[in-house]
Amino acid sequence: MNAKAVFGPRIHVEKLVFSVTPDARATKFDAFVEHSAPSPASRTDAWNHYRQGWAQRADKRGVDLLVLVPDASGVPRDHWFVEVKDFRVITTPPRPSNLTKLGATVAQKVLDTHACLQDAAAHASVPEEAQFSQDALAAPSTHVVLHIETYPGGEHSRLFPAPAVLAANVKGTLARELFAFGATLRVCLGGSDMRGYPWAVEDAHPPSASG
């Protein structure tokens, strides 16, 4: 695996592209091939340390994206854990329990990712992963973001609460589950004002112009 494949200024997650600001560093931490492969070995664009070791533990999961922003002198300042849920196109209806437990799931992914960073800082075989882990753990400010592209409406509408309600429910759960973590918690709905975030979001494959 080439570790550089998961580091860069533009990171693909789900059907989106996150483009970070020039001073930031971003890395795709956990991702599945075609977002359907069931085994850790299929995580070809995830971190090597996560894919080959940490993810082999059945109870461990990771967030999609990590972003690190330095201060003016280049010292790590802000570390962002980012989880992405794209409900715009779904092939099968989600289980109601998956939505009601969304906040708890994200919280556990954050805690697992943090634990993996602690392990990678000391033991990662890929230098870029070890350095990123060390810098992330040294950053004094931590942020957790759940980015949700909301369901646009259709036959599964009854399964989805109103976007504002879903966001409030998830943020409440994150606040309870991550109370001791000391992070700033945000739920960003697709199309929201992105000021205050060190990235912009766009469709990975925007629809082509007609005519």
Image (tube, rainbow, N blue to C red):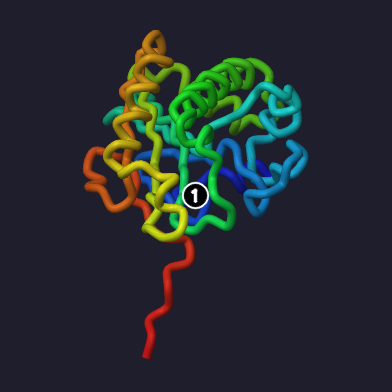
Question: Residue 146: image x %, image y %?
Answer: 40, 36
Question: Residue 131: image x %, image y %?
Answer: 55, 26
For the view shown, which residue lies furthest in the bottom direction?
Answer: 211
Please name whichever residue, 176 or 31, is drawn nearer the observer in this view of the structure. 176
Question: Residue 211: image x %, image y %?
Answer: 37, 91
Q: Residue at x 39, y 22 (%)?
A: 174
Using the image, determine if residue 98 lies above or below residue 116. below
Q: Is residue 74 visible?
A: no
Q: Residue at x 33, y 27 (%)?
A: 171
Amino acid residing under circle 1: Ile
Residue at the spot of label 1: 11
Question: Residue 87: image x %, image y %?
Answer: 46, 51
Instruction: Using residue 192 as the reference point, say whether residue 120 is left or right of it.
Output: right
Instruction: Using residue 63 as the reference point, say whether residue 159 is left or right of it.
Output: left
Please name whichever residue, 16 or 6, is drawn nearer the observer in this view of the structure. 16
Q: Residue at x 63, y 16 (%)?
A: 119
Task: Assign a secondary structure to mark 1.
Answer: strand
